[in-house]
Amino acid sequence: MDPSRAAELTDFIQQLDAEIPINAELLALVDQALTHVSSGRARNLERLEFLGDAVLRLAATEFIDRHHADLAVGACSNLRAQLVSDRWLAELGEQIEIEACLILGSKAQGDAAAQATIRADATEALIGAL
Protein backbone atom coordinates (compact mmCIF):
# COMPACT_ATOMS: atom_id res chain seq x y z
CA MET A 1 0.00 0.00 0.00
CA ASP A 2 1.18 3.47 -0.85
CA PRO A 3 2.55 5.22 2.29
CA SER A 4 0.29 8.24 1.79
CA ARG A 5 -2.79 5.99 1.58
CA ALA A 6 -1.65 4.15 4.73
CA ALA A 7 -1.28 7.48 6.54
CA GLU A 8 -4.70 8.64 5.32
CA LEU A 9 -6.36 5.45 6.53
CA THR A 10 -4.49 5.52 9.84
CA ASP A 11 -5.74 9.06 10.49
CA PHE A 12 -9.28 8.04 9.51
CA ILE A 13 -9.29 5.02 11.82
CA GLN A 14 -7.86 7.04 14.72
CA GLN A 15 -10.61 9.63 14.26
CA LEU A 16 -13.15 6.82 14.62
CA ASP A 17 -11.53 5.43 17.77
CA ALA A 18 -8.01 6.24 18.92
CA GLU A 19 -7.80 2.91 20.77
CA ILE A 20 -8.16 0.70 17.69
CA PRO A 21 -4.83 -1.08 17.25
CA ILE A 22 -3.61 -0.33 13.74
CA ASN A 23 -1.56 -2.84 11.80
CA ALA A 24 -0.93 -3.71 8.16
CA GLU A 25 -3.76 -6.26 8.05
CA LEU A 26 -6.31 -3.76 9.37
CA LEU A 27 -5.12 -1.10 6.93
CA ALA A 28 -5.53 -3.56 4.04
CA LEU A 29 -9.07 -4.43 5.16
CA VAL A 30 -10.08 -0.79 5.59
CA ASP A 31 -8.58 0.05 2.20
CA GLN A 32 -10.65 -2.75 0.68
CA ALA A 33 -13.78 -1.54 2.51
CA LEU A 34 -13.28 1.94 1.10
CA THR A 35 -12.72 0.77 -2.47
CA HIS A 36 -15.93 0.90 -4.49
CA VAL A 37 -16.75 -1.71 -7.12
CA SER A 38 -16.68 1.01 -9.79
CA SER A 39 -12.93 1.40 -9.23
CA GLY A 40 -12.37 -1.81 -11.20
CA ARG A 41 -10.13 -3.23 -8.50
CA ALA A 42 -10.49 -6.93 -7.67
CA ARG A 43 -10.29 -6.19 -3.93
CA ASN A 44 -13.30 -4.00 -3.29
CA LEU A 45 -15.96 -3.54 -0.66
CA GLU A 46 -18.42 -6.24 -1.77
CA ARG A 47 -17.31 -9.09 0.55
CA LEU A 48 -16.82 -6.79 3.52
CA GLU A 49 -20.21 -5.19 2.91
CA PHE A 50 -21.74 -8.67 3.11
CA LEU A 51 -19.90 -9.31 6.38
CA GLY A 52 -20.80 -5.88 7.76
CA ASP A 53 -24.48 -6.52 7.05
CA ALA A 54 -24.35 -9.73 9.11
CA VAL A 55 -22.50 -8.00 11.97
CA LEU A 56 -25.00 -5.13 12.02
CA ARG A 57 -28.03 -7.42 11.95
CA LEU A 58 -26.63 -9.48 14.84
CA ALA A 59 -25.72 -6.40 16.89
CA ALA A 60 -29.15 -4.85 16.28
CA THR A 61 -30.88 -8.11 17.19
CA GLU A 62 -28.92 -8.39 20.44
CA PHE A 63 -29.65 -4.74 21.28
CA ILE A 64 -33.37 -5.18 20.68
CA ASP A 65 -33.46 -8.41 22.68
CA ARG A 66 -31.75 -6.75 25.65
CA HIS A 67 -33.55 -3.42 25.64
CA HIS A 68 -36.95 -4.23 24.13
CA ALA A 69 -37.70 -7.76 25.29
CA ASP A 70 -41.40 -6.92 25.54
CA LEU A 71 -41.81 -6.19 21.81
CA ALA A 72 -43.57 -8.65 19.56
CA VAL A 73 -41.41 -10.42 16.97
CA GLY A 74 -42.89 -8.38 14.11
CA ALA A 75 -42.14 -5.13 15.92
CA CYS A 76 -38.60 -6.37 16.59
CA SER A 77 -38.11 -7.06 12.90
CA ASN A 78 -39.39 -3.59 11.98
CA LEU A 79 -37.11 -1.92 14.52
CA ARG A 80 -34.11 -3.92 13.32
CA ALA A 81 -34.85 -2.94 9.73
CA GLN A 82 -34.75 0.72 10.76
CA LEU A 83 -31.52 0.25 12.71
CA VAL A 84 -29.68 -1.31 9.76
CA SER A 85 -31.27 0.74 6.98
CA ASP A 86 -29.31 2.29 4.13
CA ARG A 87 -30.62 5.70 5.22
CA TRP A 88 -29.07 5.31 8.67
CA LEU A 89 -25.83 3.90 7.24
CA ALA A 90 -25.58 6.80 4.76
CA GLU A 91 -26.07 9.30 7.59
CA LEU A 92 -23.40 7.58 9.66
CA GLY A 93 -21.06 7.59 6.66
CA GLU A 94 -21.65 11.30 6.24
CA GLN A 95 -20.95 11.96 9.95
CA ILE A 96 -17.63 10.13 9.82
CA GLU A 97 -16.78 11.77 6.47
CA ILE A 98 -16.23 8.43 4.79
CA GLU A 99 -16.32 9.93 1.30
CA ALA A 100 -12.96 11.62 1.87
CA CYS A 101 -11.30 8.17 1.89
CA LEU A 102 -13.37 6.40 -0.77
CA ILE A 103 -11.79 5.16 -3.97
CA LEU A 104 -14.39 5.47 -6.73
CA GLY A 105 -14.39 4.85 -10.44
CA SER A 106 -15.20 7.74 -12.76
CA LYS A 107 -18.78 6.59 -13.32
CA ALA A 108 -19.55 6.52 -9.57
CA GLN A 109 -17.81 9.87 -9.04
CA GLY A 110 -20.22 11.54 -11.43
CA ASP A 111 -23.37 9.88 -10.08
CA ALA A 112 -24.74 12.37 -7.55
CA ALA A 113 -27.95 10.37 -7.15
CA ALA A 114 -26.00 7.34 -5.94
CA GLN A 115 -23.89 9.12 -3.31
CA ALA A 116 -26.07 8.10 -0.35
CA THR A 117 -26.08 4.47 -1.47
CA ILE A 118 -22.31 4.52 -1.98
CA ARG A 119 -21.84 5.99 1.51
CA ALA A 120 -24.15 3.36 3.02
CA ASP A 121 -22.37 0.49 1.24
CA ALA A 122 -18.94 1.73 2.28
CA THR A 123 -20.05 2.28 5.88
CA GLU A 124 -21.37 -1.27 6.04
CA ALA A 125 -18.12 -2.59 4.55
CA LEU A 126 -16.11 -0.55 7.03
CA ILE A 127 -18.05 -2.16 9.87
CA GLY A 128 -17.21 -5.53 8.36
CA ALA A 129 -13.53 -4.61 8.14
CA LEU A 130 -13.30 -3.35 11.69
Image: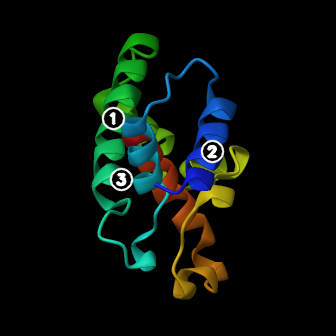
Marks 3/2: CA distance? 23 Å
Amino acid type, label 2: Ala
Percent position of residue 39, x then y: 45, 76
Element type at mark 2: helix
Instruction: From the viewer's perspective, tell me whether residue 58 is left or right of residue 38.
Output: left
Element type at mark 1: helix
Marks 1/3: CA distance? 10 Å
Q: Which residue is mark 2?
A: 7
Q: Which mark is residue 49?
A: 3
Percent position of residue 66, x then y: 40, 11
| Location of residue 126 with respect to 120 vertically, above or below | above
Image point 45% across, 36% down: which residue?
A: 79
| Location of residue 48 with respect to 70 vertically, above or below | below
| Location of residue 57 with respect to 101 vertically, above or below | above
Q: Which mark is residue 118?
A: none
Image point 36% across, 73% down: which residue?
A: 41
| Location of residue 24 with respect to 59 vertically, above or below | below
Callouts 1 and 3 close, C-beta under 8 Å: no
Question: The C terminus is located in which quarter?
Answer: top left
Q: Which residue is mark 1?
A: 55
Q: Identify the mark nearer the N-term, 3 or 2.
A: 2
Tell me the quarter of the picture where residue 11 sits.
top right
